[in-house]
Image (spheres, rainbow, N blue to C red):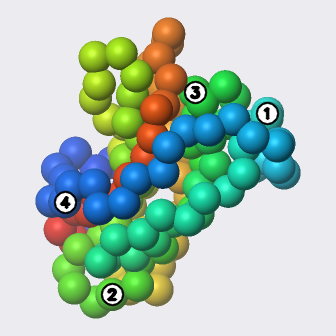
Amino acid sequence: MILKKFAAVLGGAMLLAATATVGTATAAPAGASACGPQTRISSAEGYAWIAFCDGNTRVVGTVYDTKSDGRCPLVMGYLSGTGGTVNSNWAGPKDDNSPVDIGAAAGRTFVGAGMGYIRC
Protein backbone atom coordinates (compact mmCIF):
# COMPACT_ATOMS: atom_id res chain seq x y z
CA MET A 1 0.00 0.00 0.00
CA ILE A 2 1.22 3.47 -0.84
CA LEU A 3 2.29 5.46 2.18
CA LYS A 4 -0.71 7.68 2.70
CA LYS A 5 -1.39 10.93 4.07
CA PHE A 6 1.10 13.62 3.13
CA ALA A 7 -0.33 15.00 -0.06
CA ALA A 8 2.44 17.05 -1.56
CA VAL A 9 1.16 17.04 -5.13
CA LEU A 10 -2.35 18.23 -5.77
CA GLY A 11 -4.19 17.34 -8.91
CA GLY A 12 -7.29 19.41 -8.30
CA ALA A 13 -8.45 22.82 -7.43
CA MET A 14 -11.16 23.99 -5.13
CA LEU A 15 -14.54 22.83 -6.34
CA LEU A 16 -16.65 23.99 -3.45
CA ALA A 17 -15.53 26.10 -0.53
CA ALA A 18 -16.76 26.36 3.01
CA THR A 19 -16.11 29.66 4.72
CA ALA A 20 -14.83 29.80 8.25
CA THR A 21 -17.58 30.95 10.53
CA VAL A 22 -17.94 31.14 14.24
CA GLY A 23 -21.13 29.51 15.39
CA THR A 24 -22.59 27.47 18.17
CA ALA A 25 -20.02 25.04 19.47
CA THR A 26 -20.64 21.38 18.69
CA ALA A 27 -19.02 18.23 19.96
CA ALA A 28 -15.32 18.43 19.18
CA PRO A 29 -13.01 15.58 18.22
CA ALA A 30 -10.40 14.53 20.79
CA GLY A 31 -7.81 17.23 21.29
CA ALA A 32 -9.99 20.02 19.88
CA SER A 33 -11.62 22.68 21.98
CA ALA A 34 -14.43 24.87 20.65
CA CYS A 35 -15.71 23.92 17.19
CA GLY A 36 -18.30 25.56 15.00
CA PRO A 37 -21.03 23.64 13.21
CA GLN A 38 -20.09 20.83 10.83
CA THR A 39 -20.20 21.64 7.12
CA ARG A 40 -20.33 19.23 4.19
CA ILE A 41 -18.09 20.03 1.23
CA SER A 42 -17.83 17.90 -1.90
CA SER A 43 -16.14 17.37 -5.23
CA ALA A 44 -16.34 14.88 -8.09
CA GLU A 45 -13.95 12.59 -6.19
CA GLY A 46 -15.68 12.52 -2.79
CA TYR A 47 -16.87 14.63 0.11
CA ALA A 48 -15.92 15.71 3.63
CA TRP A 49 -17.65 16.74 6.83
CA ILE A 50 -15.56 19.44 8.51
CA ALA A 51 -15.72 21.96 11.34
CA PHE A 52 -13.58 25.02 12.06
CA CYS A 53 -12.20 24.86 15.61
CA ASP A 54 -10.12 26.78 18.12
CA GLY A 55 -10.78 30.26 16.72
CA ASN A 56 -10.47 29.03 13.12
CA THR A 57 -6.92 27.78 13.71
CA ARG A 58 -7.87 24.12 13.11
CA VAL A 59 -10.08 22.23 10.66
CA VAL A 60 -11.24 18.80 11.80
CA GLY A 61 -13.54 16.15 10.35
CA THR A 62 -13.48 13.24 7.91
CA VAL A 63 -12.87 13.00 4.14
CA TYR A 64 -14.47 10.20 2.06
CA ASP A 65 -13.53 8.75 -1.37
CA THR A 66 -16.64 7.81 -3.39
CA LYS A 67 -15.24 6.88 -6.82
CA SER A 68 -12.86 4.37 -8.39
CA ASP A 69 -11.19 7.00 -10.55
CA GLY A 70 -7.54 7.02 -9.45
CA ARG A 71 -8.10 10.32 -7.63
CA CYS A 72 -8.04 10.47 -3.84
CA PRO A 73 -9.81 13.48 -2.28
CA LEU A 74 -8.43 15.67 0.48
CA VAL A 75 -9.42 18.86 2.29
CA MET A 76 -7.52 22.09 1.62
CA GLY A 77 -7.61 24.74 4.35
CA TYR A 78 -7.16 28.29 3.01
CA LEU A 79 -4.98 30.52 5.20
CA SER A 80 -5.44 34.17 6.11
CA GLY A 81 -2.80 36.80 5.42
CA THR A 82 -0.69 36.12 2.36
CA GLY A 83 -2.73 33.04 1.49
CA GLY A 84 -1.54 29.50 1.06
CA THR A 85 -3.12 26.20 1.95
CA VAL A 86 -2.71 23.36 4.40
CA ASN A 87 -3.73 19.94 3.11
CA SER A 88 -5.31 17.11 5.05
CA ASN A 89 -4.73 13.40 4.81
CA TRP A 90 -6.27 11.92 1.69
CA ALA A 91 -8.87 9.17 1.45
CA GLY A 92 -8.65 6.39 -1.09
CA PRO A 93 -9.25 4.15 -2.82
CA LYS A 94 -13.05 4.08 -3.20
CA ASP A 95 -15.02 3.64 0.04
CA ASP A 96 -12.04 4.68 2.19
CA ASN A 97 -12.16 7.58 4.62
CA SER A 98 -9.51 9.47 6.52
CA PRO A 99 -9.49 11.91 9.43
CA VAL A 100 -9.02 15.60 8.79
CA ASP A 101 -7.05 17.50 11.43
CA ILE A 102 -5.07 20.41 10.04
CA GLY A 103 -3.68 23.44 11.84
CA ALA A 104 -2.83 26.94 10.71
CA ALA A 105 0.66 28.33 11.16
CA ALA A 106 1.26 30.53 14.20
CA GLY A 107 -0.50 33.87 13.86
CA ARG A 108 -2.68 32.66 10.96
CA THR A 109 -6.25 31.39 10.74
CA PHE A 110 -8.29 29.50 8.20
CA VAL A 111 -10.60 31.66 6.09
CA GLY A 112 -12.19 28.74 4.25
CA ALA A 113 -11.77 25.19 3.04
CA GLY A 114 -12.27 23.29 -0.19
CA MET A 115 -11.61 19.95 -1.83
CA GLY A 116 -8.60 18.84 -3.85
CA TYR A 117 -7.19 15.46 -4.82
CA ILE A 118 -4.02 13.56 -5.54
CA ARG A 119 -3.56 10.78 -8.10
CA CYS A 120 -3.42 7.50 -6.25
Please tell me which of labels 1 and 3 falls first in the chain. 1
Please tell me which of labels 2 and 3 falls first in the chain. 3
Picture disc at residue 12: 4
Residue linked to disc 3 = 57
Please tell me which of labels 1 and 4 falls first in the chain. 4
Picture disc at residue 67: 2
Amino acid carrying label 1: it is Ser
Mark 1 nearby-residue class (10 Å; few <14, some 14–19, many ≥20): some
Alpha carbons under labels 3 and 4: distance apart: 24 Å
Instruction: Tell me the residue at 50%/43% (across/down).
Output: 19
Q: Name the foreground residue: 12 vs 65.
A: 12
Residue linked to disc 1 = 33
Alpha carbons under labels 1 and 4: distance apart: 31 Å
- 34 with respect to 62 (left or right): right
Quadrant of the rendering where the C terminus is positioned: bottom left
Q: Are marks 2 and 3 in contact (CB under 8 Å)?
A: no
Mark 4 nearby-residue class (10 Å; few <14, some 14–19, many ≥20): some
Instruction: Tell me the residue at 40%/84% (across/down).
Output: 66
Alpha carbons under labels 4 and 2: distance apart: 15 Å
The image position of residue 7, as x and y in percent, is 28, 50
| Above or below: residue 82 compared with residue 4 | above
Q: Secondary structure at mark 4?
A: loop
Q: Secondary structure at mark 2?
A: loop
Alpha carbons under labels 2 and 1: distance apart: 33 Å
Please tell me which of labels 2 and 1 falls first in the chain. 1
Q: Is residue 4 visible?
A: no
Residue 94, quarter of the rendered image: bottom left
| Above or below: residue 44 compared with residue 27 | below
Please tell me which of labels 4 and 2 falls first in the chain. 4
